Amino acid sequence: MPKKKCLSAGRVPLILFLCQIISALEVPLDLVQPPTITQQSPKDYIIDPRENIVIQCEAKGKPPPSFSWTRNGTHFDIDKDPLVTMNPGSGTLIINIMSEGKAETYEGVYQCTARNERGAAISNNIVVRPSRSPLWTKEKLEPIILQNGQPLVLPCRPPIGLPPPIIFWMDNSFQRLPQSERVSQGLNGDLYFSNVLPEDTREDYICYARFNHTQTIQQKQPISVKVISAKPSRERPPTFLTPEGNASNKEELRGNVLSLECIAEGLPTPIIHWTKEDGTLPINRTFYKNFRKTLQIIHVSEADSGKYQCIAKNALGVIHHTISVTVKAAPYWIMAPRNLVLSPGEDGSLICRPNGNPKPKISWLTNGVPIEIAPDDPSRKIDGDTIIFSNVQERSSAVYQCNASNEYGYLLANAFVNVLAEPPRILTSADTLYQVIANRPALLHCAFFGSPLPTIEWFKGAKGSALREDIYVLHENGTLEIPVAQKDSTGTYTCVARNKLGVAKNEVQLEIKDPTRIIKQPEYAVVQRGGTVSFECKVKHDHTLIPTVMWLKDNGELPDDGRFTVDKDRLVVADVGDDDGGTYTCVANTTLDSVSASAVLSVVDVPNPPFDLELTNHLDKSVQLSWTPGDDNNSPITKFIIEYEDSMHEAGLWHHQTEVSGIQTTAQLNLSPFVNYSFRVVAVNSIGRSVPSQASEHYLTKAAEPDKNPTTVEGLGSEPDNLVITWKPLNGFESNGPGLQYKVSWRQKDGDDEWTSVVVANVSKYIVSGTPTFVPYLIKVQALNDVGFAPEPAVVTGHSGEDLPMVAPGNVHVNVVNSTLAEVHWDPVPLKSIRGHLQGYRIYYWKAQNLSKRSKRHIEKKILTFQGSKTHGMLPGLEPFSHYRVNVRVVNGKGEGPASPDKVFNTPEGVPSAPSSLKIVNPTLDSLTLEWEPPGHPNGILTEYTLKYQPINSTHELGPLVDLKIPANKTRWTLKNLNFSTRYKFYFYAQTAAGSGSQITEEGVTTVDEGKMAMASRQVDIATQGWFIGLMCAVALLILILLIVCFIRRNKGGKYPVKEKEDAHADPEIQPMKEDDGTFGEYSDAEDHKPLKKGSRTPSDRTVKKEDSDDSLVDYGEGVNGQFNEDGSFIGQYSGKKEKEPAEGNESSEAPSPVNAMNSFV
């Protein structure tokens, strides 16, 4: 943004005079203004022919503009075409070709005009073309046959589409064909082979063209390639397949991507390098593609013109090709014309300054009409790329177009001249709050508008003068900049805009915050792979801001890995791996600032792979391998591991060959016959292994006879009349030559037969049929190939197939050990009757019935197998008092023989299980009733139940144990004469003749005497209440006063009859105190009735009914009616009498009434 810095000079106010070019000034939409194009379709507009055509044209203006279109330079009357509509309030066209019509009908060059009373703006020329995705022309492709090592180019030549298609090569399975330095696709879509190999033979090289605009893919006919490898290919130096010759030219437009390509053939495959003859390649804009065969420079400019050289090199030579690059340029803006707002009588100018190669031609239009034929305007003068305006009037308002064009394209810019007379207005929101970090720039905005252009002043404080100090910078758009804001910069700032038509002002607030700082930064760390590293980052910040701390690795997010742990001040990386090395950055952000600190983590790593592998001293069974070690990454290399690949038999699989010391760079390798070797080397240090090196060249050794025979030879029959001979075959590496086969030989071990032999292909088994059942055989398997036989093989023994045993075990008998265990004995069967390998004996046993329950329910049989030749076994887990059956069978590899006759035995009684349940029901004051269910497994005949119980006191101590026998036919029992409100613990179990079973326990409680307990609880509770104690004190005080009064009256000779007392209490609410005679008319109600419900009244007969009070009077005694004195006081109310505590002597536990006290005193 351009800025104008005005320093104070003496006391002259700091005022910003803005220039006439006000690019940042936007005319508010509520003011009259010419049209401005805001949205339009691209110049080259390729449409999908399957969808409706939408040609965009949007504009703003005041009044709102109207829209019209031209097509191919003439007026396009949309009203005459039913398929064309225009959006309301918009110039956007919708051409409905989905219902009818064709896209090709509407091809052409379209231009939109937006017009109102102040002028007309026009769009670019929009070239509308439908996309095309044509089919490949049918062609007959002959198979390509060539020798191993020759170069090959498979042409693609896709059909010309719009836009051009994307080319790729795949097979019939839609799998991309692998590409490499040897095989790659050129920029023209052809597939180039620097040299062919036998594995390149295939019949489905297919070129595909993808047309992205219509989402379609077209396919070329498959190409068949056959590579013949009759003799080794001769190596040759490189030559270029593309481009041809030693030099070529390339032209590219400014801003595009420059793509240069060199593809070379040769054997071995050439490597490509790039240089620029008269300069260096731009570092940040240069990229290599297609295995360095393509050089790309993005955002190319005229400075990238020059000579580029590609170099192709292999072991036999080097070639060069020079490409001369010329960068042309379609027109581009140096300064585009910008809208001009002037007040009547002002001057101004429109500047249109393009550039290009070749230099573009400029033409001016006004309101879409060439300026040469437009109506004359005396305030306007054209001077090349500038239109100068002087003393403009309202009629000078118009839209001007500048067109800059050359052979590569054109630019069209609209800029209006709007003549207005408007007082200033400030567009920035009032009372905006700006928060800025101390010692940083503060920008206080004051967007404004006015015509003539207002001048801007800034003030600080309510009564401050215009800013005069040289620490401020005022920008053309009205923004006030404080380059280094300090704490004292906080305050209220006022922006004032003035022109000759008026004044506008706006206040904003500025707050200065303390900067965020990292007071403890992360530090450089070195860690071994698998270790843990920690980085610390402590942050100090302004107390009104809330910071967020995040960690980055190499300026990106931390890996989504549980090994990375972040807490408030620390990052911990556990189990550090090779990829964890790099730069770790702590970033502390607030809403106003951001600070960061970084540290490097170096991981001690495995070595880099060796390179430059070379084979020398080629012999039939050995070769010498040499290599160059890679970087050891700060840990010395301890050894090299050499691996080999056999591409003939196990392509892609690598095997261990040998190891050598870490200081060696050569090794003599022993080889096997008929193997196509390639080697690679792995470096090892204390941290681990490197990645493998690149593979060496291939070396094919000569064929020889096998030097070993198959292993794991076995003979086992799958049927009673066969012998299946199996073995582990040799792998391809062990075959030592082509035509691997096996000679299989066998004969009976105990006979005099000759060996029978057969030669079979490379399989892993052979079946001999018609053999006797389970007869031993001698077997051997020998390897052979086209060169000869392997050494004589070892002889192994096998057996023909097994059959089911014929005889059942005899003399089966059972010894019952106890109620759950029995031992079974049997005699072994004759070996010949087994007809196979003896695996053991299998016992089947099942419970026929329970002796106590004659159940006929079927019970599943149980099976136990005893390995080998055992003749006895134990049967565990039997149920007591049960009837069992058992039989025995012999087992071989084929299966079970016949069962022996069932043997029957009985198990004796056992102790029963615990009763199924025990519960306490119907508790009373002195009895508990027990109910139970018999044992689920009685294991015999129940003889009786035993019940033991004992009381438990409040401290959980157990009392004396009571033992009780209960008949076996009972399931309920009541215990009487128990203590009330007492907990008892019960132990209950059943018995058979074999003894006592497991017990079940339960606890129960007898009930409580509720009346006595409630009375005692109530009395205790009342006696300890605070209100009760206070009431008793009040009563005692009142009695003392009465005694004193009585004593005085007695001394005066007065009487205190009971009748007068009763009269005084007849109606306490209407009897005032009689001051003349000293009687107390409200004594009884005021004190004696407090325990009663509020609002209750004492009847004249001095009795209290139960319904008159919520507090039952019985609750205060021992179940008898309360008694009253003649003055209505409740006798015994405050006795505090304890439960079951008799009165001693003649003393009463009741508090005396006042009348009794007076009478006794008298």
Image: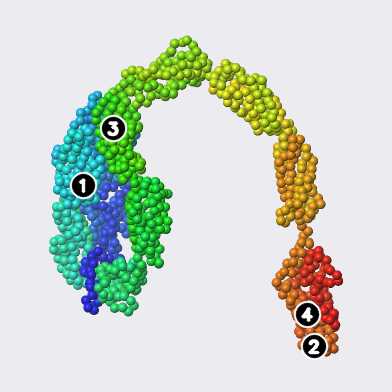
Q: Residue at x 25, y 27 (%)?
A: 618
Element at label 3: strand
Indicate which disc residue 258 carries.
1
Element at label 2: loop
Q: Nearer the viewer, mark 1 or mark 4?
A: 4
Indicate which disc residue 1039 carries.
4
**Looking at the image, is 1021 positioned above or below residue 800?**
below
- 549 or 67, which is in the foreground? 549
Q: Residue 315, position in %: x, y?
A: 20, 34
Amino acid type at circle 3 is: Ala
Q: Is residue 154 visible?
A: no
Image quarter hosting the C terminus: bottom right
Q: Residues within 10 Å of mark 1 (few under 14, many from 20)?
A: many
Instruction: Identify the residue position indicated by label 2 in the image.
Output: 1077
In three-dimensional space, the C-alpha distance between marks 2 and 4, rounded to whole angstroms, equals 19 Å
Indicate which disc residue 595 carries.
none
Tag 4–tag 3 contact (CB < 8 Å)? no
Q: Residue 841, position in %: x, y?
A: 60, 24
Instruction: Identify the residue position indicated by label 3 in the image.
Output: 667
Q: Residue at x 32, y 48 (%)?
A: 52
Q: Mark 2 or mark 4, which has the lower sequence index?
A: 4
In three-dimensional space, the C-alpha distance between marks 4 and 3, rounded to whole angstroms, equals 127 Å
- 626 or 993, which is in the foreground? 626
Q: Residue 294, position in %: x, y?
A: 22, 42
Taking 28 as reference, is 281 left or right?
A: left
Amino acid type at circle 4 is: Ile
Tag 1–tag 2 contact (CB < 8 Å)? no
**Looking at the image, is 563 positioned above or below residue 834?**
below
Tag 3–tag 2 contact (CB < 8 Å)? no
